[in-house]
Amino acid sequence: MSEERFDFNPGIRKKIFIAAILGVVLIILGNIFQPKGHGEEHGDEGTHTEQVADTGHEEAGDHDTEGDHDQGDDHGAADAGHGAEADGHGGGHGEKGWFSRLKADLWINNVYFVGLALIGLFFFAIQYAAQAGWSAYIIRVPLSMAHWLPYAGVLMIVLFFLVKGDIFHWTHHDLYDPASPNYDALIDGKKGFFFGPGMSTDGLPIFYLLRMVVFFGVWVFLFRKLRSLSLVEDELGGHSYWRKMRSISAIFLVIFAVTSSISAWDWVMSIDTHWFSTMFGWYVFASWFVTGLAFITLAVVFLKEAGYFPNVNMSQIHDLGKFVFAFSIFWTYIWFSQFLLIYYANIPEESVYFVERLMSDKYAPFFFANIFMNFFFPFLILMTRDAKRLFVFLKIACTVVIIGHWIDFYLMVTPGTMGESGHFGLTEMGTFLVFGSAFMFVTLTALAKNALVPKNHPMLEEAKHHHI
């Protein structure tokens, strides 16, 4: 077959550049119009999962004995813990300005777009490990998404040093000193996970940073290996490179299963240091995965409309729509399972995570918008067979899912970081546009460098005649 290439023309570049500039302008305007005095007024009302360090755990026994875990007591425990933290760490949530808000937004976006890049590689690897033929024509789209991984790795390390004091409560060294009034026995019990067994808590969290470096190193190494084999296959043909990619993909999938979960604990769950969920790794994966599927679907639809992928038929488009539909339901299943168990048990140190999101005037609207945008909307709009084959429905549903899961990550990070000082406005939209523009530029640049379709893929004929 002839070599088809994506034309990353100046018109597309200009649109991406304009979006990035608009994002910067929105960030600046967000600083100018930042509400003044909000932190001082509402600082003591903010709740935080780590704020129940002493009070929440001390009252847990009383609650268990009495069998009465009403939400008002949970909230009160959180507030009492917050007061102790505020005294020990310069106000806790009480004094959160625009720069702290920007730091939280930077961390949200980097974690979000790391997930998109990882899912691109994950999707690519699944197709080879499963010997899938239906996706042979579109496989370069998810592979191009993974080109963001090296940039994301550098950003993640740099951002950690920028934001660690504001976002990660466990980085405060006095929490580990029994002589300090801010000593926290629960966090002290986790120091080996952050700093390394037997390591001093006065220095850098070596074990935490080592995991970050190793994870990105392994991901980037396997990505480059798979990409190079795919490009060599274009030149030399044969089945040997496909078999090698299948083997490496299987290795990557095993590594991904472990590293993606630990990354979710490190980068997101550790923000709420006292709180934990055994389902959290699955939850973050589900959010990443459905977002990645929505992006892949959106990219294929736009490329098909632009005249690319002439051999991609509506059955392949239908399959992509089914993936978005199915994994929106899967995400909701994980979300509901996690929420129901914590809500039903009503243990203060667990339920405070949802109290600060569901019971807050700041975050409750986003809590319900999260469910609507990521479950009800895609479920209803993609329910029928025809909807999964109509570009207009796919574009609307996938766009809503991409934005909706950004809100999901906003809810994971901001309440535990900013408390009641958190906002959603120009700064959040601006950082999303800047990161999104950078991600799109890297992805489309990679897509344009090589053939859009792997011309010597052994299953192109099967993909050409794929029908459901």
Image: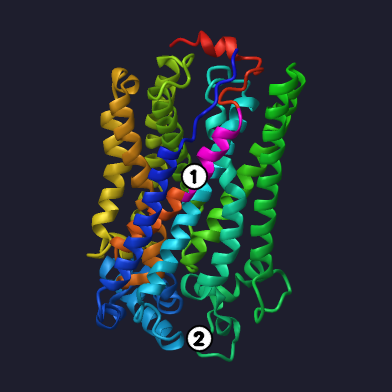
Q: Nearer the viewer, residue 75 or 297?
A: 297
Binning the other alpha carbons within 10 Å of mark 1 as few (below 14), some (14 to 19) or many (20 upward) gives some
Location of residue 377 with respect to 187 vertically, above or below:
above
Location of residue 325 with respect to 282 vertically, above or below:
above
Q: Nearer the viewer, residue 386 or 234?
A: 234
Q: Which residue is mark 1?
A: 441
The first of marks 2 and 1 along the sequence is 2
Of the numbered discs in the image, which one, if any, rests on residue 142? none
Classify the position of the C terminus by image quarter. Answer: top left
Asked if residue 103 lies left or right of residue 400, the reply is right
Location of residue 192 with respect to 304 vertically, above or below:
below
**Local secondary structure at mark 2:** loop
Classify the position of the N terminus by image quarter. Answer: top right
Asked if residue 16 lies left or right of residue 142, the reply is left
Percent position (x, y) of residue 466? Answer: 50, 11
Residue at 57% x, 60% y: name it.
156
Q: Which residue is mark 2?
A: 182
Percent position (x, y) of residue 376? Answer: 27, 37
**Local secondary structure at mark 1:** helix
Amino acid at dot 1: Phe
Percent position (x, y) of residue 208? Answer: 64, 64
- Quick one: which residue is furthest to the front in this view? 10
- The image quarter in which residue 313 lies: top left
Amino acid at dot 2: Asn
Residue at 58% x, 65% y: name it.
158
Q: Nearer the viewer, mark 2 or mark 1?
A: 1
Residue at 45% x, 79% y: name it.
54
Asked if residue 344 lies left or right of residue 157, the reply is left
**Which region shows up in magenta?**
438-450
